[in-house]
Structures are given as structure tokens and as C-alpha cells.
Image (cartoon, rainbow, N blue to C red):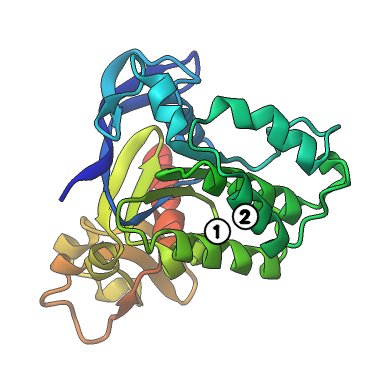
């Protein structure tokens, strides 16, 4: 399986934060959800992929090209959607196209026009006056009009209403029908990831906590709960983000560690949201111990 994006041993240190040996890959034809709590390093990783931020060590390849030495060739084939508009807000859509067209040898004006009509965007208003959902659609239209093979989205659904979010997910689902394309979708709305992603990478405190298929993640972790007195000592050591309360406890556990648990304890598959919550609780437990 050919990878459209590969990150190997990425390290980047700031005064109060560091990416530590971040490694993951995205095969062609798939969508990867890139998740983690605020401050986990998602945006720093994306900025490194885009060569917008230098890194201390490691290697990033996109389309098999080096992210630093081949950055211009990569950006020719790359589409980016941020949580805020990166285009000149005082221009209208026609002026935006005239500004962008010279930068892309594969720019398709008819495709751009088609997408603008499909997305219901007015071509005579300043784009700065667009709603957040309209701005997001405009950035998608730009990416699709220069035949981007990889789209990277950094928190694009933040602040969007449910209808706009649903429209974005439909657009990405249609886009990935071409098996030579890929999507890296960074978001804190994990329900969106669970709906459309094939792969998931969880970043926590600058490190990769999990990377692999969404289905494998779903099968690998469960939420366990019950009476604290019913937990065998050996099992308690394996619990992640243990939380005791007046009537019992809950925690995250690897499904491989569920064998032989007492019948008095209940468990169910963990959602991505729950996994992130228990990872954060584990941090607090370690700090207080």
C-alpha cells in the first residue's frame, strides 16, 4: 500500500512544548482523523508538513517528496483548509481566482466556477463578509480546482453549525472516492472522525499515543466500571485514567486485559472521545501520585 504522507521521527522543541519522535503514515485513498486535546501538537505537526515551521530532526515526505527541499512541488499538489480564511478578505471570489490562478499549473477555472455554484457562494461579495461555513467551502473549492491530491484540514469544523459540518463531511467523502487522494483531518469533534475516517492518529503531549485503523482502535479499548472493591489488584495496575466516585469507579482498559475480570464489573467499547478523556485523567493521576 503506497503512502501519500509519511512522518518519521519528527522532533521540534519550543520553550514550553516539544514534539517527540512523532511518526505516522497515511496510505493513498484514505482519510485520517488527527485528534488530541488542545496543546497536544497537532497544529505544530501540520505546520511542519507544510514547511511553515522548521523542525529539529526527522523526515516528512508527501507524494514521496521531501517536505523541505521539494516544498514548492508539494504545495502544487496540496490543498489546505484552516479554521480561519487564509485568502485576502477584501476581494471577491472572481478577484481571488485571478490572484491564485498563476500559482497552479493545473488550475481549472471551469471546475472552480462549478464548485462555487454547487456550494452556493456569491461571487460579487467580499469573502471577508462570508459566514464561517461559506469560507470553509471557498477553501475547499480552491483545493479542488487545482486538483489537489492531498487535503489537510486543521480544525475546519470549529464553530460550524451542524448543517455546514455535515456538508463538509459529504464533500470529503466524495473527494476520497478517487483512490489516489488522501485527507488528513485534524479536529476536536471526534464524532466527525468516527463518521468518515479510516485511520486515526492520537497525539498526546507531543507524542503519538495511537496510530492505526479506526476499527482497530475501536476494538482495542473499553470503558470498565463497577465497584472499586471488585477490582483485582493486578487489573487495577492496567487501568488508564482511573476515576473513583461515591458509588463506584470507571476507567479505560485495553480489551486484551479484560480476560478473567469479575462478572460484577461491566464494560463497553470506548469512543474516541472517551479515550481522549481517560488519557487526560491518567495525566492528572500521574501528577497527583
Q: Work out how far the residue at label 2 is from the one at label 1, CA to CA, in angstroms.
A: 8 Å
- In the image, taking residue 125 as reference, residue 248 lies left or right, namely left
Q: Is residue 31 above or below residue 59?
A: below
Instruction: Tell which residue pokes out farthest to the left in this image.
Output: 260
Residue drawn at (72%, 56%) of the image: 133
Q: Earlier in the sequence, mark 2 or mark 1?
A: 2
- In the picture, the disc for residue 54 is none
Where does the image place residue 50, in percent across and percent down from the top left?
Answer: 45, 27
The secondary element bearing badge 2 is classed as loop
Residue drawn at (35%, 23%) of the image: 67
- In the image, taking residue 115 as reference, residue 224 lies left or right, namely left
The secondary element bearing badge 1 is classed as loop
Q: Is residue 259 above or below residue 47?
A: below
- In the image, taking residue 124 as reference, residue 106 lies left or right, namely left
**Viewer-side residue, 44 vs 136:** 136
Residue 156, can we see it? no
Q: Nearer the viewer, mark 2 or mark 1?
A: 2
Q: Which residue is mark 2?
A: 157
Choose top left, top right, bottom left or bottom right for residue 59: top left
- Residue count near mark 1 (Cα–Cα under 10 Å), binned few <14, some 14–19, many ≥20: some
Q: Are marks 2 and 1 in contact (CB under 8 Å)?
A: yes
Q: Which residue is mark 1?
A: 189
Amino acid at each position: 500500500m503506497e503512502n501519500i504522507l509519511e512522518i518519521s521521527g519528527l522532533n521540534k522543541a519550543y520553550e514550553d512544548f516539544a514534539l517527540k519522535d512523532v511518526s505516522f503514515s497515511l496510505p493513498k485513498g484514505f482519510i485520517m482523523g488527527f485528534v488530541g486535546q488542545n496543546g497536544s501538537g497537532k497544529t505544530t505537526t501540520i505546520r511542519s508538513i507544510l514547511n511553515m515551521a522548521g523542525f529539529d530532526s526527522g523526515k516528512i515526505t508527501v507524494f514521496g517528496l521531501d517536505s523541505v527541499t521539494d516544498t514548492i512541488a508539494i504545495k502544487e499538489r496540496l490543498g489546505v483548509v484552516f479554521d480561519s480564511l487564509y485568502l485576502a478578505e477584501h476581494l471577491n471570489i472572481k478577484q481571488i481566482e485571478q490572484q491564485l490562478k498563476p500559482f497552479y499549473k493545473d488550475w481549472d477555472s471551469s471546475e472552480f466556477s462549478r464548485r462555487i455554484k454547487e456550494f452556493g457562494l456569491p461571487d460579487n461579495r467580499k469573502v471577508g463578509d462570508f459566514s464561517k461555513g461559506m469560507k470553509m467551502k471557498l477553501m475547499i473549492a480552491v483545493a479542488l480546482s487545482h486538483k489537489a491530491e492531498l487535503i489537510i484540514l486543521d480544525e475546519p469544523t470549529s464553530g460550524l453549525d451542524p448543517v455546514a459540518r455535515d456538508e463538509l463531511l459529504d464533500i470529503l467523502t466524495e473527494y476520497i472516492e478517487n483512490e489516489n487522494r488522501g485527507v488528513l483531518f485534524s479536529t476536536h469533534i471526534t464524532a466527525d472522525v468516527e463518521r468518515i475516517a479510516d485511520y486515526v492518529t492520537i497525539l498526546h503531549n507531543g507524542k503519538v499515543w495511537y496510530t492505526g485503523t479506526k476499527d482497530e482502535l475501536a476494538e482495542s479499548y473499553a470503558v470498565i466500571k463497577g465497584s472499586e472493591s471488585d477490582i483485582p489488584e493486578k487489573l487495577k495496575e492496567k487501568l488508564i485514567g482511573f476515576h473513583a466516585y461515591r458509588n463506584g469507579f470507571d476507567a479505560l482498559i485495553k480489551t486484551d486485559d479484560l480476560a478473567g475480570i469479575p462478572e460484577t464489573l461491566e464494560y463497553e467499547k470506548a469512543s474516541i472521545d472517551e479515550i481522549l478523556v481517560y488519557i487526560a485523567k491518567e495525566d492528572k493521576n500521574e501528577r497527583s501520585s
